[in-house]
Image: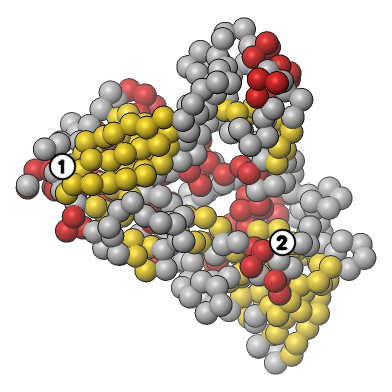
Amino acid sequence: MSNSILVVGGGFSGLTAALEAAEVGYEVFIVEKEPYLGGRVTQLNKYFPKLCPPTCGLEINFQRIKKNPKVKFFTLAEVTKVSGGPGNYEVTVKIKPRFVNNNCTACGKCVEACPVEREGEFDFGLGKTKAIYLPHPMAMPQRYVIDANVCSGTSCAKCVSACEYQAINLDEQEKEIVLNVGSIVIATGWKPYDVKKLTNLGGGEIKNAITNMQMERLASANGPTGGKILRPSDNKEPKKIAFVQCAGSRDQNHLNYCSYICCMASLKQCTYIREQYPDAEVVIYYIDLRAPGRYEKFLKRIQEDEKIKMVKGKVAKLEEDGEGNVIVTAEDIIDGVKKEETYDLVVLATGMQPSLDGVELPFNVETKEGFIVGGEEQGIFAAGCAKMPLDVMTSAETATGAALKAIQTLVRR
């Protein structure tokens, strides 16, 4: 029997669950598939409820982890097999090679030497990195990682020669470890709905029709434009911007459900635009505007902005004109007309899809549209957006609840 807890996912929910359990004395293992902890929050410019930058909450949690020997984490790691039952689970974890060890000081000389570029997935394709890269400035662990899919390996090895600390091993191999735990928290988070499936909205082919997460990266100081919101096609400042709500959500052909936070994300991003471009015109096309709980005041503030117009109606299609502008065809339900308007930039509020949707799970738990809806009788508990679409604050609350239930599984057996 084991008194340890496994947390699958090292985003905000996973970190919260792990720390809540560890700080009352339980050993916790975090398994995270990315090369860094922090999850989706690290990619945001600001997050609700206080519009804090990611450093605000994550840095505190990172310090708590560093100071707590009860927390052990594995990055570039995935759970491949789970056997046993509550109180005695045997979990097999596959760890991919990072090719960079603990000697790394993040000095950056390896990056200067590397001749190979790759598309930066952290910036959702808006920027590039070298084959050896630091995922983002506040990454934990603060170590570089090599993308084996583009690295030339030992045939190049320029990064090895440039490193003064013998931190790079291009021969590192994948490995497996086995963990014995008593309960499991699934905090695998979410992914943006694939814009390529939204063919009527350009299918990702219109350069100046970006997703809401791409907007977060453009507005972020550590993003590809240094925090300046510019059109991807020509780096021009946009003067007329449209937001298209429910891009994939509340749609039987895509995501049946409301993604909960998309409306608030767009309202938040309106503030980004208004701060940088006080004279810019903004139009929000929506089906219903949803501002849960305390966010009603924020919605009212945006509605009172004379530079922001809200049009109730569904967008039928997006097209691109010869200058890279985006033509929006949409209905206006209030006026009872169908309109075409041209914008410099369009932001698609793509839906929140659980990361586990379409993934074969090593856990025997019930799911609905990719969300975990069962498993508690087995000592397996979902937290955050693995459970349902949520904002950061509510995700943390569900993580605390999951940690408590995981502990109860251990003490009640």
Q: Position of residue 21 (x, y in %)?
A: 23, 38
The image shows residue 261, relative to residue 336, as above or below, that is above
> How far, Cα to Cα, is label 2 from label 1?
46 Å
Q: Nearer the viewer, residue 129 or 54?
A: 129
At label 1, counting other C-alpha atoms closer than 10 Å, the crowd grade (few under 14, some 14-19, many 20 or more) is: some
Whether tag 2 and tag 1 are in contact, CB under 8 A, the answer is no
The secondary element bearing badge 1 is classed as strand
Label 2: which residue?
204
The secondary element bearing badge 2 is classed as loop
Q: Nearer the viewer, residue 274 or 238?
A: 238
Q: Judge from the rendering whether residue 123 lies leftward or rightward of residue 383; answer left or right.
A: right
Q: Foreground mark, 2 or 1?
A: 1
Q: Position of residue 139 (x, y in %)?
A: 52, 31
At horizontal 56% and vertical 46% (from top left) the residue drawn is: 44
At horizontal 29% and vertical 34% (from top left) the residue drawn is: 178
Give the label on residue 283, or none: none
Q: Is residue 142 visible?
A: no
Disc 1 marks a residue whose amino acid type is Asn
Q: Quadrant of residue 3?
A: top left
Q: Position of residue 319 (x, y in %)?
A: 81, 71
At horizontal 27% and vertical 57% (from top left) the residue drawn is: 364
Disc 2 marks a residue whose amino acid type is Gly
* Residue with the most extreme top position: 164
The image shows residue 116, relative to residue 350, as above or below, that is above
Q: Judge from the rendering whether residue 116 lies leftward or rightward of residue 376; answer left or right.
A: right
Label 1: which residue?
88
At label 2, counting other C-alpha atoms closer than 10 Å, the crowd grade (few under 14, some 14-19, many 20 or more) is: some
Q: Position of residue 386 (x, y in %)?
A: 38, 56
